[in-house]
Image (cartoon, grey):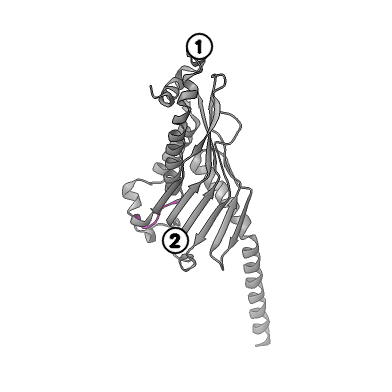
Amino acid sequence: MRKLLIIGGAVVAVVIGAAVFLFSSLDGIVKTIIEEVGTQVAGVKVSVDGVKISLSDGKASISGLSVANPPGFSSDPAFRLGEISVALDTGSLGKNPIVVKEVLVGAPAVAYEIASGGSNLDAIQKNVKAFTAKQGGGKDAAKAEPAKGEDKKVVIDRLAITGGQVKLAAGGIPGANTTAKLGDIVLTGIGKDSGGASAAQVAQRVLDSLVAGAIKSASSFGNLLGNVGDKAKSLVPADAGGAVKGLLGK
């Protein structure tokens, strides 16, 4: 009996030790997951400066989330998001889908670069759509019951992106580098009608909105580009001409 008690005590000690290690390392684990999954979904490097999680409060924060540019563009990030705060429904943490009450993204910086072949945002958007399709993220797949799959899904009640800026960089156009305000973006009920959304589906929904917002903001660059002259416009690579014309409304 004494041996059993000793063994039982040792097992309990190991479990407690493992739990303490897990919770103390949770921030780093989530950071790694965001970077690895984000890179797979976006097709470009995704990095995070830091993650802080409080399961007891149902809150989390992510700082310095950066999405690199695709090949053929500058070394600057395509997206750099400011502080991201997340409010969780703690009652759903052990369930599928997990319910996220609110996600707030503050002061994102978006680089809208035009080069041969199109824009950097188009390239990343295509990567995300290709990944989502590969994972069976179409409409039919979205209606599948969460219990039938192993992947965790989420429902996001509200996601807001505020205080952002868009920077235009049109390769080959002298002086055509400027910034504009990114309109606030509010998304509600992500994954609510489909039994939850996968990470790729959430990324696609958010990216689609960011790209649409960036393009809308970039339309204000039309006047600037319209004043650079035909000679300067002729310096733009032929494949990028369509994107520039879109900004000019021509």
Q: Is residue 28 above or below residue 81?
A: below
Q: Are marks 1 and 2 in contact (CB under 8 Å)?
A: no
Residue drawn where x is 65% and y is 63% of the image: 24
Q: Residue drawn 44% across and 38% down?
A: 213
Q: Residues within 10 Å of mark 1 (few under 14, many from 20)?
A: few
Q: Is residue 140 above or below residue 180?
A: below
Q: Would residue 68 appear left or right of 14 to someone viewing this image? A: left
Snapshot quadrant of residue 250: top left
Q: Quadrant of the N terminus?
A: bottom right
Q: Residue furthest top?
A: 231
Q: Secondary structure at mark 2?
A: strand
Residue 18, by quadrant, is: bottom right
Image position, residue 190 (x, y; %): 40, 53
- The amino acid on which the numbered mark 1 sits, given as a three-letter code, is Lys
| Nearer to us: label 1 or label 2 | 1
**Residues in magenta, as a range:** 194-198
Q: Earlier in the sequence, mark 1 or mark 2?
A: 2
Name the chief secondary structure element in magenta. loop
Label 2 crowd (10 A; few <14 / some 14-19 / many >=20):
many
Q: Secondary structure at mark 1?
A: helix
Q: Which residue is mark 1?
A: 231
Q: Is residue 71 visible?
A: no
Q: Nearer the viewer, residue 92 or 2?
A: 92
Mark sitting on residue 80: none
Which circle marks residue 99 in the picture? 2
